[in-house]
Amino acid sequence: MILPIYAFGQSVLRKKSEHISPDYENLNTLIENMFETMYESNGIGLAAPQIGLPIRLFIVDGSEIEDIHPPAFKEVFINPTILDEFGEEWDFEEGCLSIPDIRENVRRKGDVTIHYFDANWNEHTRTFGGMAARIIQHEYDHIEGILFTDRISPLKRSMLKRKLDYISKGITKAQYKMKFPPRK
Ligand code: ZN
């Protein structure tokens, strides 16, 4: 089932998400729906707050961009904790399904070590680099209530203010279903 993507301005995108337990109701269906939703909107990562749930869960599938940013990489992250970020910082133009039509360079460290459970509740501590690290860092930010637009310069952010306001009012050309903040 395709779920609507919560748009910039939705308060759930600003919450610090909660851990879940293995008996979380319908978790497998939720994960399936998240993949379906992500593929429908041509995303390479999706975090639970983006579909309205403030829980520590995100999915990643970088196989679409494998040609330019190998290796292919698909994983489910449940209750993740970033243990370390290291390596050379680099800029990459990030986008976000919750913030359509905006892309900006974000500087992040090159490598990330993360502890998490996969969809079968197997426990992992793994280190990722390159594009895998980049997507993980972006999605991990989501479960901490952080958006990539928080990580650009104040000047750039002020230049984007009007565009961001439009998105939060439901004015966007996004080609996928979105859920906008309630009107005040
Ligand atoms: Zn995002």
Image (cartoon, rainbow, N blue to C red):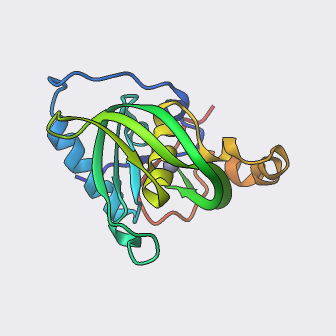
Of 4 and 48, nearer the camera is 48
Within the image, what quadrant is residue 50 found in? top left
In percent of width and height, residue 30 lies at 22, 41
Question: Can residue 6 be seen in this snapshot?
Answer: no
Horizontally, residue 24 falls left or right of residue 58, namely left
Looking at the rendering, in which quadrant would you find the C terminus? top right
Name the residue rendered at 76%, 53% in the picture. 160
Q: Residue shown at 39%/62% (left/top)?
A: 41
**Is residue 129 in view from this perspective?**
yes
**Nearer-the-camera pick, 173 or 100:** 100
Tally the marks. 0
Viewer-proximal residue, 30 or 81?
81
Residue occupying the far front of the picture: 87
35 left or right, relative to 22 = right
**Residue 42, image x and y in percent?**
40, 66
- Residue 66 falls in which quadrant of the image? bottom left
- Image location (x, y in percent) of residue 81: 41, 30
In the picture as drawn, the residue positioned furthest to the bottom comes out as 67
Identify the residue shown where x is 42% and y is 56%.
132
Q: Name the residue located 38 percent from the left edge and 22 percent from the top edge.
A: 18
Say whether residue 78 is left or right of residue 45.
Answer: left
